[in-house]
């Protein structure tokens, strides 16, 4: 299936959903550089231009080997002149543009502030413009008000800024599963997001809940949250009730959040043995996301929540531009006909695409 990069006739698809992108990235030097440029643009509100760099990085991640010569990029899609220039420079050490960004005070501060749960680029920029540069400075500025999410973000910053391991994700799955089954014995829990794509570490753990009876998806999350509270393992919760309407057609918007019931949590995960000696604390705070779609839309929600963001963006774009169909986290529509799907294979088949496994969706 993989074709040599050097052969010009072996076209790499411009759509991430037609590429197999594993975590085995042979072009990390280049993709790291491109992602710094993308991140810098995103932190200054330029989502559009940043996408070009994200796409270029994604194409390189799908290659079966490291690029050797600059001309090898000639036959690759999504690589504009700016991306090509960065690749060329990164080849002989590091790019001065990347170095400049990494040393830039604005970039560094914005990255620091937006690493806090609940702080987006707008808030980060607001604090930067007030002259704030560190958490300590932010803390001693009484006029800076924090919302509930940001307060939790600072309170548990040390823990939730650390990566979550696969072992921790598995331990959380047991806890979530226990609560879900206690509330509804016929419901099931699956891990989704980055861990489903095979990542060893994540910034959170994403779970999707499947309920076989209609309507149960709306009552399960509040009940699970209530149980976590009674177990004293919930540090923060933001429950977003479903606003999903079965009759609504998919949206044309790529990055819109879906309308399923979901919750963004910070949970206490007990350590196996060792205690945090200083604080006498025997747990780690971990970010957890739960989503509970209705059964007939489960497969679309699973696909959407598995990501990656770029893979899903291109899958939706491919559906619309190449097949004239509308795809989002809720459904796939051909004209006004909903196309049911029991498995993810069904969705790829509806779109006339070769099936791409979750661990090949790291675009
Ligand atoms: P994330 O948890 O943000 O990302 P990730 O799991 O891929 O990476 P990480 O290891 O850093 O956690 O999101 C998981 C997927 O869920 C992502 O593809 C976007 C998707 N998603 C939705 O589709 N709708 C939503 O409302 C939210 C919050 C996420
Ligand atoms: Mn390989
Ligand atoms: Mn995740
Ligand atoms: Mn998540």
Image: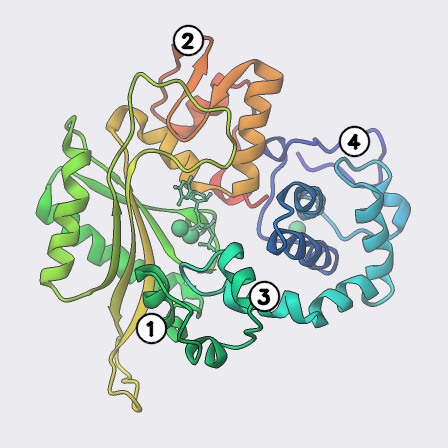
Give the residue pinned by disc 2: 336
Quadrant (top left, top right, bottom left, bottom right) of the C terminus = top right
Residue linked to disc 4: 10
323 above or below 139? above
**Along the line of sight, the residue nearer the viewer: 3 or 199:** 199
Discs 2/1, front: 1
Q: Nearer the viewer, residue 230 or 139?
A: 139
Look at the numbered disc 1 and give the secondary structure of its residue. helix
Marks 3/2: CA distance?
A: 48 Å
Report which residue position mark 1 lands on.
155
Specify few, some or many for label 2: CA neighbours under 10 Å numbering under 14, 14-19, or 20 or more.
few
Q: Nearer the viewer, mark 4 or mark 1?
A: 1
Residue hosting label 3: 129
- The image shows residue 107 at horizontal and vertical percentages of 64, 65
Report the disc number at residue 182. none
Q: Quadrant of residue 277?
A: bottom left
Choose top left, top right, bottom left or bottom right for residue 13.
top right
């Amino acid at each position: 299936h993989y074709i040599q990069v050097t052969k010009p006739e072996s076209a790499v698809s411009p759509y991430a959903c037609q590429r197999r992108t594993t975590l085995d990235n042979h072009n990390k030097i280049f993709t790291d550089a491109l992602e710094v440029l993308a991140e810098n643009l995103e932190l200054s509100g330029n989502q559009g231009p940043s996408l070009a760099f994200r796409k270029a990085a994604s194409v390189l991640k799908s290659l079966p080997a490291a690029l050797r010569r600059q001309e090898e990029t000639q036959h690759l899609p999504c690589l504009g002149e700016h991306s090509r220039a960065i690749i060329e420079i990164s080849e002989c050490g590091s790019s001065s543009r990347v170095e400049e960004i990494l040393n830039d005070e604005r970039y560094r501060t914005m990255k620091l502030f937006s690493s806090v749960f609940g702080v987006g680029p707008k808030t980060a920029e607001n604090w930067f413009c007030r002259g704030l540069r560190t958490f300590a400075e932010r803390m001693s500025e009484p006029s800076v008000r924090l919302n509930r999410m940001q307060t939790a973000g600072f309170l548990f910053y040390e823990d939730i800024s650390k990566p979550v391991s696969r072992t921790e994700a598995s331990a959380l799955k047991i806890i979530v599963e226990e609560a879900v089954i206690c509330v509804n014995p016929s419901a099931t829990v699956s891990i989704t997001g980055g861990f489903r794509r095979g990542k060893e570490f994540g910034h959170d753990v994403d779970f999707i809940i499947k309920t076989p009876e209609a309507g149960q998806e709306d009552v399960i999350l509040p009940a699970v949250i209530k149980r976590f509270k009674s177990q004293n393992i919930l540090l923060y919760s933001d429950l977003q009730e479903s606003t999903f309407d079965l009759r609504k057609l998919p949206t044309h918007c790529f990055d819109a959040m879906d309308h399923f019931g979901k919750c963004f949590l910070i949970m206490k995960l007990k350590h196996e043995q060792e205690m945090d000696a200083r604080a006498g604390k025997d747990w780690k705070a971990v970010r957890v996301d739960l989503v509970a779609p209705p059964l007939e839309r489960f497969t679309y929600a699973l696909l959407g929540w598995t990501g990656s963001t770029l893979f899903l963006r291109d899958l939706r774009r491919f559906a619309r531009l190449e097949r004239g169909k509308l795809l989002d986290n809720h459904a796939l529509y051909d004209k006004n006909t909903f196309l049911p799907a029991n498995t993810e294979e069904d969705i790829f088949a509806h779109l006339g695409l070769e099936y791409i496994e979750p661990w090949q969706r790291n675009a």
